[in-house]
Image (cartoon, rainbow, N blue to C red):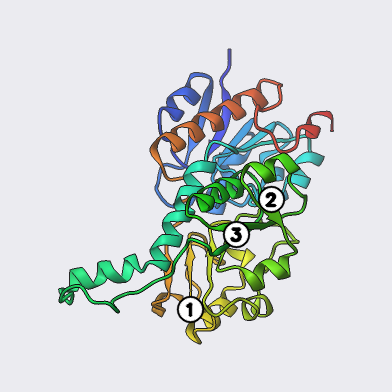
């Protein structure tokens, strides 16, 4: 049997390439930097499937370049904002992603960031390496308390709920904002409750963003929202960079209008908004949310399972547009 032609924009870990190679001929971008658009357009031509990363733009023009044989786009990520799903659906192209499996690792990293910024771990690490620590002091790098404080979660999907559970473990009150209210038994099991977004922003001591990026969430946290945060509050963005207006964030941090921020994602990723790197009240991580061994292994497997199912005429087990099959 002929092998499927597949464009793969990065080598998959954990045996993913071997699994894929059994039934596919990969056109692989084998460098550890983003595949150039021109390379992608050329290698998409005539492909049955595309395996891509969250940072790749798979728009209508890329699908057009692939041609009518394209059956499936499989992204190794939970977020699929890099793919024009509407255009894919119209063309009958199925889109698969890797939700669920990364919720715990991403929630863990959210907490790593909250602790790093609010308990000044990075400042402390710098001090130790610089040899400027002279001994315990009652006033040295004093950070925030968690118990009894309010954690506000924007976007209460699987990751948001895991972050909430961890917040309860720290003795916090957890509120959330979401498009839909959680089922009462889920709210009760965490426990948490829904509040309007403006109330969440104005009353939380820690705000963690876990919503997808779309038209509604673009710049959800802008100058006005940042201005209404408590001056003692922290903002954590592990969702997508453009959910925050980073110019406004730089200004708020520089003027100490909020206590601090921790970011895993960036408005102009992988580039930093000017001014961000000079600030000492922000912790910056290089998009590490799901970067844990077992999580990444499972993500690679799911990516291949989605790809193969779609190319063999089925619906990927984790599919964001199953309706494309009927299109
Ligand atoms: C990471 O950002 C993901 O969407 O999987």
C-alpha span from label 3 to label 1: 22 Å
Determine the secondary structure under disc 2. loop
Q: Is residue 226 above or below residue 75?
A: below
Residue at x 45%, y 29% (from the top left corner): 16
Residue 211 in view, yes or no = yes
Mark 1 — residue?
A: 274
Residue lying furthest top: 1
Circles 3 and 1: CB atoms closer than 8 Å: no
Percent x, y for residue 252? 55, 81
Q: Is residue 216 above or below residue 313?
A: below
Residue at x 45%, y 38% (from the top left corner): 296
Q: Is residue 81 above or below residue 113?
A: above
Where is the C terminus found, in terms of image quarters?
Answer: top right
Determine the secondary structure under disc 1. loop
Percent x, y for residue 218? 69, 65
Percent x, y for residue 208? 57, 60
For marks 3 and 1, give the one nearer the viewer.
3
Residue 221 in view, yes or no = no
Mark 3 — residue?
A: 209
Q: Nearer the viewer, residue 254 or 45?
A: 254
Q: Is residue 113 left or right of residue 184?
A: left
Label 3: few (<14), some or many (≥20) within 10 Å? many
């Amino acid at each position: 049997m002929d092998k499927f032609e597949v464009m793969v924009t990065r080598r998959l870990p954990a045996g993913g390439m071997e699994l894929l190679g059994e039934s596919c001929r990969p056109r692989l971008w084998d460098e550890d930097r983003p595949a150039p658009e021109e390379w992608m357009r050329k290698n998409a031509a005539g492909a049955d499937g595309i395996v891509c990363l969250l940072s790749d733009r798979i728009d209508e023009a890329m699908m057009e370049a692939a041609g009518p044989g394209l059956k499936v786009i499989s992204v190794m990520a939970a977020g699929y904002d890099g793919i024009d799903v509407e255009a894919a659906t119209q063309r009958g192209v199925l889109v698969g992603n890797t939700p669920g499996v990364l919720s715990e690792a991403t929630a863990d990293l959210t907490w790593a960031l909250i602790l790093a910024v609010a308990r000044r771990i990075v400042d402390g690490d710098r001090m130790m390496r610089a040899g400027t620590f002279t001994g315990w002091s009652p006033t040295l790098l004093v950070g925030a308390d968690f118990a009894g404080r309010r954690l506000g979660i924007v976007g209460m999907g699987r990751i948001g709920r895991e972050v909430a559970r961890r917040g309860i473990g720290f003795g916090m009150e957890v509120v959330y904002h979401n498009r839909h209210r959680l089922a009462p038994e889920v709210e009760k099991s965490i426990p948490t409750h829904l509040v309007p977004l403006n109330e969440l922003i104005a009353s939380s001591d820690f705000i963690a963003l876990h919503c997808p990026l779309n038209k509604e969430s673009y710049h959800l946290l802008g100058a006005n929202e940042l201005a209404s945060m408590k001056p003692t509050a922290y903002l954590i963005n592990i969702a997508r960079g453009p959910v925050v207006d980073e110019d406004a964030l730089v200004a708020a941090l520089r003027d100490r209008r909020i206590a601090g921020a921790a970011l895993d994602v960036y408005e102009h990723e992988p580039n930093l908004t000017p001014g961000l790197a000079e600030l000492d009240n922000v912790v910056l991580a290089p998009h590490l949310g799901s970067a844990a061994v077992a999580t990444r292994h499972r993500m690679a497997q799911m990516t291949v399972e989605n790809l193969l199912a779609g190319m063999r005429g089925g619906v990927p087990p984790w599919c964001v547009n199953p309706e494309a099959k009927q299109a």
